[in-house]
Amino acid sequence: MALLGLIGLLAVALMMGGRELLGISQPWRLVEWEYLLRKPLDQQISGFAVVALVAIGLILPLVRWLGARRRALWLWRTVHASVGALAVAGMAVHTGLRLGSNLNLWLSGAFLMLCGLGGLTGVGMGRARASRLWLRPVRLLHIILVWPALALLGLHVLASYYY
Amino acid sequence: MTAWPRRFVYGLLFCLPVVFLGLRYQRGEEAAFLPGRTSDGHHQIESQCSLCHDPFGGAKDEACLECHGPSLKARQDTHAPEKFEDPARSAQVALVDARSCVPCHREHRAEARLRGSVTVPTTFCIDCHSEIRQDSPSHAEFSDSGCASAGCHNYHDNRALYRNFLAKDRGSPRLRADPRVPTRTSAFEPRPTPEPDLPLPFGPDRKSRDGDQGPGWKGDLLTAIMEWSRSAHAREGVNCTGCHQRPSGPSGSAPGAVWTWAVEDTTCASCHRDERLGFRNGKHGMRLTAGLAPMSPGLARAPMKKEGSSRTLGCTSCHGVHQFDRALAAVSACEGCHNDEHTRSYRASGHFTAWLRELRQEAPPGSGVSCATCHLPRFAVPEEHARAGRSAGQSSQHKGIRVEHNQNGNLRPNDRMWREVCTHCHGASFSLAALVDAGLVAGNFHGQPSPALTSMDLVEKEERNEKPRQP
């Protein structure tokens, strides 16, 4: 779980600073990224892939609410952490490593914070109980952020089709 | 936290962005939904999404053509969409879908935007014109991405580089024998000036009242009358009531008229229809066309002077309120707002010297070069629109010469200006070399163009390489 959490944190860091890194190390690649999977159909496919991953990620709170057993909960936590990291990768493809403007920027911010806090929670879960006092507020914040992120995601999909 | 307060907080956090953005949308503040930086051409109207976007329909070509269509038609669009409807071109359409605007000009994509707001890779010309290396040996060593980005070809208006046009002007001198642009004729569409049918609301000693005078007017009535008496309006017989009197009711509904201190631009347009139309098509007036508040320098992306950044643009912001001095409008009005290197360098240029000589009547009309000479070029109008004989000294070859008030119509790419303006005075080769020299353009042509390979050199090269035709 800690490893998945670390991968998630790394994905978030790459998403946030990827463009700058690419611009410094391989500026010619940046031009390719501008045209990579940025056609309307490609973007719809990558966008809905991210939405599907988010939906899978939401199964964990559902099975918790339904009172799943410990083993099943562990399994769904692993799935939750994996799809979280994958969703950040999907976001990188969908946006071309951009954070966007206005509504898209707010969504990117909320989503990356959500995934970052999720990654930290995953790292915390792998540590001894005594050394993870910070875990509770981080996890609470992770859960709280789900709601505005979902609202912004819905508005982003609506705005994409409306305009 | 117990379950219900917690659920309430979650619900609140979910609803907050929805309510916030919903209210913004309802108030017409749609800028919050902009997915990226809008292009320089559209940023003025970016808050009015419905101008380009249909609800759940995306951006339609019709919206693009509503503004850009007439210009494309007038410039004989080299790649008109109809050409690509031909099934024989399906292979080319698969590479670049040139049947509509959006595939090549995707808005809000600042990172991928190239010259001319193009958002496809710079190699797109070669996708279809791969034979160019064999057909034109002079182009053999050019890079695939250079066709449009090097400042040579223009996808929609390639007329400036038509080989026959260039060949015809080959060997022309740096400065022509009689370097002059056509002299404009009167800008008036004749309209009878109404006789005052109500007592004028002022006496000779009455000052204008604050709050009800025309925009920007701070002078007193005597000054206004003095300024007017020296203006073209006075010479043409357009008196106070010509502008300050309007019908008391909707057109034709009620007799009589009322005095109005504030004069709307629409009043100017009742005589200066073409000028108003051009103004509204350009960046100075496009916000008015979109139904938005007038443009002001404070809203511009180009460097502007801080003082007066809140002034609004209309007819009188450049022409003045009563003097309507064209010389003032042609230079000082521009310098009053624009603060880029090109504008600041103007007074050190040979163009300005020529302009001063024309103003001092040391040189013939049309020989001076003001900001307006290049950016608001003169154009010939058909005979039926012309006011033949109204203006003395007009060129006999033009039935009527008007001023295009769309000040950015020939700006991008600048080879439009080359064909429409520069070649009146300069040889084609010299002016083309000057326009591709970015440093020279920024310095307002103060100096000589640096030697560069121009289209003219390529024409010469091509003709040398061509085999003589068989009889």
Image: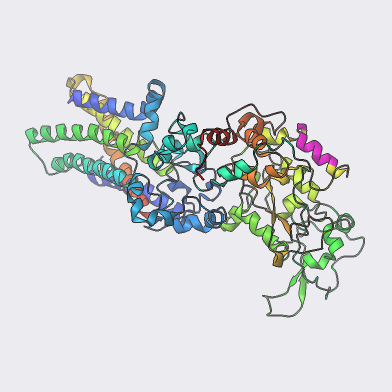
Instruction: Identify the residue at image location x=69%, y=75%.
Output: B249
Residue B204 location in percent, x, y?
92, 62
Instruction: Identify the residue at image location x=37%, y=45%.
Output: B96
Q: Which of the pair B93/B164 is nearer the observer?
A: B164
Q: From this viewpoint, is residue A98 visible?
A: no
Give the colour scheme shown.
Answer: rainbow
Report whether B276 appears left or right of B360: left
Q: From this viewpoint, is residue B11 visible?
A: yes
| Furthest residue toward right | B205
Q: Is residue B14 above or below residue B53?
A: above
Instruction: Identify the residue at image location x=9%, y=39%.
Output: A68
| Furthest residue toward front | B471
Residue A66 location in percent, x, y?
12, 44
Q: Which of the pair B26/B458 is nearer the observer?
A: B458
Instruction: Identify the residue at image location x=77%, y=31%.
Output: B348
| Prevailing secondary structure of the magenta residues | helix
Q: Is residue B430 above or below residue B21?
A: above
Residue A96 location in percent, x, y?
35, 35
Q: Was residue B351 drawn as part of the magenta stretch in this picture?
A: yes
Q: Which of the pair A132/B307 is nearer the observer?
A: B307
Q: Quadrant of the N terminus of chain B?
A: top left
